[in-house]
Each structure stands twice: as C-alpha cells, then as structure tokens.
Image (tube, rainbow, N blue to C red):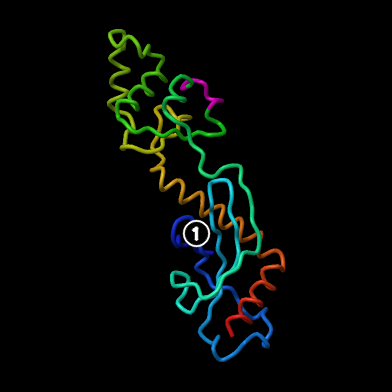
C-alpha cells in the first residue's frame, strides 16, 4: 500500500482495489475508467472512519462516490511530551519509555535538557562544569522539533508534522488491513458502483 494525504485528515491508499471480486452485473460502459480506493478519515488523533471511494481521476482526483465501511478509535496517535513537563523528569528513563519524544522549540531549552541529564543544577549556572558546557556545544540540536529523551544527549527525531503524518499513515495502513480482512467493504463498493452506473 502507498498512501497520500487528500485534504485535512484524509489518507487514501494510492493502490487501486482489485475489482475482480465485484460481479459483472455492477459494470456498465460508464464505469470503464472507474477505479476504487480505500480511505481513512481522521476526525482527531483518537477517532477515524474508513471506507471506499470511486474515482475516474485516480487517488488524488475528485471522488465520484464514497461510503464509510466502519469507524475506529485509537489510544492516541503521535503522542509526544512537552518540554516543561519533561525537564523535571529528564533523568528518569522510565518516564520516557512509553512516550520518548519531547517537543523542544528553543536551543536554550535543548541545552537545559543536556545539562539536566548531566546532573547540573539548572538554577545555578555558576556551578556548571566546563565539560558539561562542551557537551551542550557538541549536542545534537538540529532545530525545533521532537527529541528522543531516552538518549544522552537527546537526539533529533524530526518535526511534529513529520511525526504526525508518519503515525497517521501507519494507523491508516493498519485500519485498511483490518477493513480488507472482512467482506463488508465489498458490499459497500458494489453499492457505490451500482449507484454510479
């Protein structure tokens, strides 16, 4: 499966559905150029519906007809922590096992995280060791984004947008795999084709 975002929160499978499972009675000459695709529409990072659509313009084109097959709930897509919550727990590795990524927007905050991991007192800059300051200088700051706080120093994992898109694509693939295991999508697709004919 390949995926493309189509509008806000809609992920479509770019591989067309094999229509050989659809009986010939649904076909008409008007449907010669029709292709069918699966989609997942995210309403939030916790809820989505999934279904099929038909189009004559491919997965990026206008949908001729569409219908939901079902809906699903998630524990939360693309979870990450905030810097203010994470800085006080930076040396507690277990704190970052479930949600290892923390959004760091400022290089100054990244430096604080490195210093805190090294055991420096953030309230007393005069007590910081030169080796700690060198660690900050040699750190992995790559700009605003998500950093893995399990690593010392924290390593850059990408931007929030990249992370959210990748996680949505992962859950879209998982959701469509689930949909294709059943037969309900086939009857929904047959109905769409019959209505479009």
Q: Residue furthest front?
A: 195
Left or right, residue 189 beside residue 32: right
Q: Residue 94: within the magenta?
A: yes
Q: Secondary structure at mark 1?
A: strand
Is residue 56 depicted above or below 41 in this figure? below
Q: Residue at x 47, y 35 (%)?
A: 101
Q: Residue at x 46, y 51 (%)?
A: 165
Residue 95 % position (x, y): 54, 26
Quarter holding the N terminus is bottom right
**Residue of label 1:** 10
Q: Residue at x 41, y 30 (%)?
A: 154
How many marks the image carries: the answer is 1
Is residue 10 or residue 159 the one in the foreground?
10
Residues in magenta, as a range: 90-95
Q: Residue 181: within the magenta?
A: no
Left or right, residue 94 beside residue 178: left
Is residue 110 or residue 179 the one in the foreground?
179
Is residue 143 depicted above or below 53 in this figure? above
Residue 42 % position (x, y): 53, 54
Residue 164 % position (x, y): 46, 47
Quarter holding the C terminus is bottom right
Q: Residue furthest bottom?
A: 29
Left or right, residue 4 beside residue 108: right
Residue 30 % position (x, y): 54, 88
Label 1: few (<14), some (14–19) or many (≥20) C-alpha neighbours in 10 Å: some
Is residue 160 depicted above or below 186 in this figure? above
């Amino acid at each position: 499966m390949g995926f493309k975002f189509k509008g806000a929160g809609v992920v479509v499978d770019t591989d067309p559905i094999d229509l050989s499972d659809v009986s010939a009675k649904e076909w008409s000459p008007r449907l010669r150029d029709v292709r069918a695709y699966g989609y997942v529409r995210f309403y939030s990072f916790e809820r989505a519906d999934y279904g099929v659509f038909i189009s004559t313009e491919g997965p990026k084109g206008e949908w001729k007809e569409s219908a939901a097959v079902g809906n699903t709930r998630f524990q939360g897509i693309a979870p990450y922590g905030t810097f203010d919550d994470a800085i006080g727990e930076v040396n507690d590795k277990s704190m970052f096992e479930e949600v290892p990524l923390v959004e760091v927007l400022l290089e100054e905050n990244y430096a604080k995280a490195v210093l805190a991991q090294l055991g420096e007192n953030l309230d007393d800059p005069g007590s910081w060791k030169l080796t700690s300051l060198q660690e900050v200088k040699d750190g992995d700051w790559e700009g605003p984004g998500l950093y893995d706080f399990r690593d010392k120093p924290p390593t850059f994992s990408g931007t929030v947008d990249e992370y959210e898109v990748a996680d949505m694509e992962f859950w879209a693939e998982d959701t469509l795999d689930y949909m294709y295991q059943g037969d309900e999508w086939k009857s929904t697709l047959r109905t769409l084709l019959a209505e479009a004919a």
